[in-house]
Image (cartoon, rainbow, N blue to C red):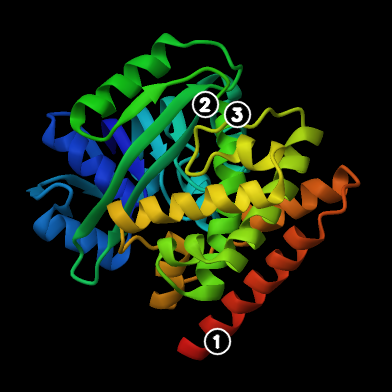
Amino acid sequence: MSNAEFAIVGAGAIGSLLGAHLARAGHDVLMIARGERAAHLERVGLSVRGLREFSQPVRVLSDPSRLRSAETLIMATKTYATAEALESLRGARVGVAFSIQNGLLKNEQLAAAWGRERVLGAIADTSGELTQTGEVLFTRNEQLLIGELSGAPSARAGRLAGIIDSAGVRASEVAEIQNFEWSKFAAWTGLMVLSIETRAPTWQYLTDADAARVLARLVREVGALASASGIALSDRAPLPVAMLVRGSEDDAVAVIQAAGARFKASAPEHKMSSLQDLEAGRRIEVEETLGYAVRLAAQARLSLPLLESSYRIASSIDRIRRSLVQ
């Protein structure tokens, strides 16, 4: 059985970046991974290039059920793998847990496993790509926000954010974290859909006038869902979603295109993880993200036609692409 200061569930790009930086800073990190990825980490450790260039040995656990305890557990799996992972971790004692996954379902799932009082909210506006060689290309180091689900200021969230920030991944503690989670989701929804439809680097569809208008309309529909859920959106997200919602549509398009110009200058090769998954023939995160939002809208009796259409298009792209590579 294993104990750890940090147990990171999932060794994809962002989980690996966090694990590598925390381990390099001297923290006890246990990466929970399976199959070829686990074997690779056991052989050569975590390798990072791009914004950072280093390799770091790390402990690996391929059987999640053998985790005895973790002071901090970080969920970094794809959303569709969460239920199975949490079932395997059912016997572990966890001090505090947070998820850097996409979507809005993640906190509910962690709270069901360990109780709401042990769960922090979090969003990661940090980007990387797991390469075919097993290295992680670190492309953007913007912000990882952590906070209490109650919305109150938090010493424990501040301590964790400080540890991660000191290790080299920019992080800070915020109040009202659920506003930020919804804000990221509003931006992520449009980015995800356009990434798999255009199959282009992020800056290209952000700067395209028609794609930017579709993204603006998707953000506005998710904004309506947020408002119906009592959530105030923020501009502290990958895109300034509060501004996109309250201004005119033409103004929103101009803001998105300006963001695209910044992406072109600072991260011209950036691709959404959804596009990376599509290109690799992996399953895309659809049901637990777009599908969850569509179901929330139905419960609230909201008509969000572009969101629903985008969900169905993404679902069909996912099914067709995976059938072609099987």
Instruction: Report, in whole angstroms, how far the alpha carbon at label 3 lies from the one at label 2.
Output: 12 Å
Q: Quadrant of residue 152?
A: top right
Farthest-out residue, right:
301
Residue 159 in view of the camera: yes
Q: Which one is earlier in the sequence, the residue at label 2 or at label 1?
A: 2
Q: Residue at x 58, y 30 (%)?
A: 234
Q: Which one is earlier in the sequence, the residue at label 3 or at label 2?
A: 2
In the rendered structure, find residue 119 and report the number of the disc placed on it: 2
In the rendered structure, find residue 323 and report the number of the disc placed on it: 1
Q: Residue at x 58, y 60 (%)?
A: 212
Instruction: Report, in whole angstroms, how far the alpha carbon at label 2 lies from the one at label 1.
Output: 37 Å
Q: Residue at x 70, y 55 (%)?
A: 217
Instruction: Report, in whole angstroms, how far the alpha carbon at label 3 lies from the one at label 1.
Output: 36 Å
Q: Position of residue 188 (x, y in %)?
A: 55, 51
Residue at image mark 3: 178
Q: Quadrant of residue 190?
A: bottom right
Mark 1 burial class by Cα count in 10 Å: few <14, some 14-19, many 20+: few
Front of the two marks 3 and 2: 3
Q: Which one is earlier in the sequence, the residue at label 3 or at label 1?
A: 3
Q: Residue at x 30, y 65 (%)?
A: 35
The reply to whether the C-beta atoms of the residues labelled 2 and 1 are less than 8 Å apart is: no
What's the residue type where badge 1 is placed? Ser
Callout 2: SS: strand
Q: Position of residue 224 (x, y in %)?
A: 77, 41
- Identify which residue, 71 or 322, lies in the foreground: 322
What's the residue type where badge 3 is placed? Gln
Tell me if 37 is positioned left or right of 324 in this view.
left
